[in-house]
Image (cartoon, helix red, strand yellow):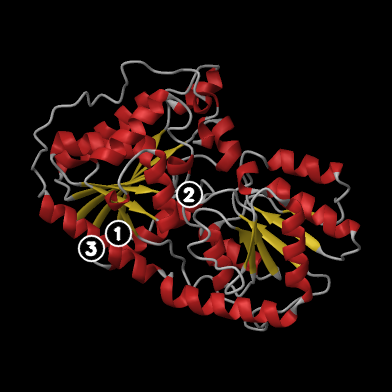
Amino acid sequence: MRICFVSRRYWPAVSGMSAYAENLLRALTAAGHEVTLVSQYRGDRQGSAVYGGGPPPPERVPDGVRLVALESRGEQAVGDGMPADFEADVAALRDTVAGLHAREPLDVLHAQYGYPTGLAVLEASERLGVPAVVSIQGGDGHWVGTCCTTHRTAIRRVLRDAPALLIGSSSFRDAVAARHHMAAERFTVVPGATDTDLFSPAPERRPGALGDPPVLIYHGRIDVRKGVLDLLEAVRLLHAGGRRLRLRFSGTGPDLDRLAHRARQLGLAGTVEILGPTGYHDAPAVYRTGDVFVSPTWAEGFSNTILEAMASGLPVVSTDVVGVVDCVRDGFNGLLVPPRDPHALAEAVGRMVDDAPLRDRLARTALRQVRTRWSWPVAAARICGVYEEVRAARPAGTTTGETRAGDGTASVVDLSCRFRREPHLL
């Protein structure tokens, strides 16, 4: 099968989407498929500062995958003081896919993220008659469409018309369906996955072991919406109560500088360590330096970092929110607290540190589950099954018979949308 995978973010952008894409691409080529990766990237200073910019390095693209890197010039208009031109990027993506198909016919188009990549792939699908799959992965379900009428119209078109929609969890599916007044049956739930060979416990340590002082690990996007400032406040409370512990942040994102400033304000310079960007293949070593993984996120599609922490043998403290409750059950394989509640978070972390039998049981249960339920061979097989379904329902070359605008633009563009000013948050 010839598959065109269109990514919103790929390495060197430090993102869960990058890890997801790399693992899926590797699984697809291992299964014998011919895969082309079309990846957006930011080449400007502003975009590069947030995630890491520039085209995907060839060495990070799995063997057998053809790479087409496409600079997001529409987004980069913000560097010139202009609103981000997402419509131009949609058109560029759509036309790139069409050009690839003209040279060598494609069997399936797969967009990672509902907008702008999902809309571009949908328009290409309608133009070319090639069946399309769209993965809704996080902010495209939580934030896109809550910002302005332009993006609400765009994302609802994708959700309504894409031949197949993949989503990482049942709770996320239900939230997106309710937000956009859709039937939940439109989505196929394919749970997130992790590389359980790459992420594994340190050979010399048993799952749930505790160092002196205990080290809390946060690894992921440094973003207020991930609860990073809530975690700082929780550690301040624990520190004020006489706790000896350390907190290590790993990752990058839009609020990296804000996090560092807040840690200094709270007098936690000696307690908090901020590592900055961490490469995907360097992340296992970071997990192995910690004792408890804390993810105080406000919402997820499905948390890759929680799965990585579980696979690394770490007990997990997280929040009772969409996208987390599908992989963490309070008291069974982790501890959950309400989001945006530093006091509850501090209490749960203190309990995890103090109760060795609890910590040991939660870590071992989580490790067993992630190996059997959330590994990449399981997820990739389900995704390939969806490809076969859409091909059978709409063989390549079969158009919908409908005529749409299809130029990546809307009749009225709302330039006041917050993502036009900060497109990296979309």
Residue toward you, 42 or 250: 250
Residue 187 circle label: none
Which of marks 1 and 2 precedes in the sequence?
2
> Which is more toward the observer, 365 or 51?
365
* x then y, percent, for residue 403: 14, 27
Q: Is residue 15 above or below residue 157?
A: below
The residue sitting at 87% across, 66% down in the picture is 244
Q: CA distance from mark 3 to mark 1?
A: 21 Å
How much space separates mark 2 and mark 1, taking CA atoms?
17 Å
The disc, 3 or 2, on the residue closer to the chain's N-terminal end is 2
In this rendered view, identify the residue nearer to me: 26 or 305: 305
Q: Position of residue 219 (x, y in %)?
A: 63, 57
Q: Label 2: which residue?
A: 11
Residue at which label 1 appears: 64
Element marked by disc 2: loop
Circle 3/circle 2 CB separation < 8 Å? no
Q: Nearer the viewer, mark 2 or mark 1?
A: 2
> CB of mark 3 within 8 Å of CB of mark 1?
no
User: Which residue is more in the foreground, 63 or 107?
Assistant: 107
For label 1, the crowd category at 10 Å Cα-Cα, with few meaning under 14, some 14 to 19 and many 20 or more, is some
Q: Is residue 75 left or right of residue 135?
A: right
Label 1 is placed on what type of residue? Gly
Q: Position of residue 111 (x, y in %)?
A: 32, 45
What crowding class fits label 3: few (fewer than 14 Cα within 10 Å), some (14-19), or many (20 or more)?
few
- Mark 3 vs mark 1: which is more N-terminal? 1
| Residue located 43% across and 18% down the image | 414
| Mark 3 lies on residue | 385
Q: What kind of residue is marked 2?
A: Trp
Residue 37 spot, x, y in % from top left: 32, 48
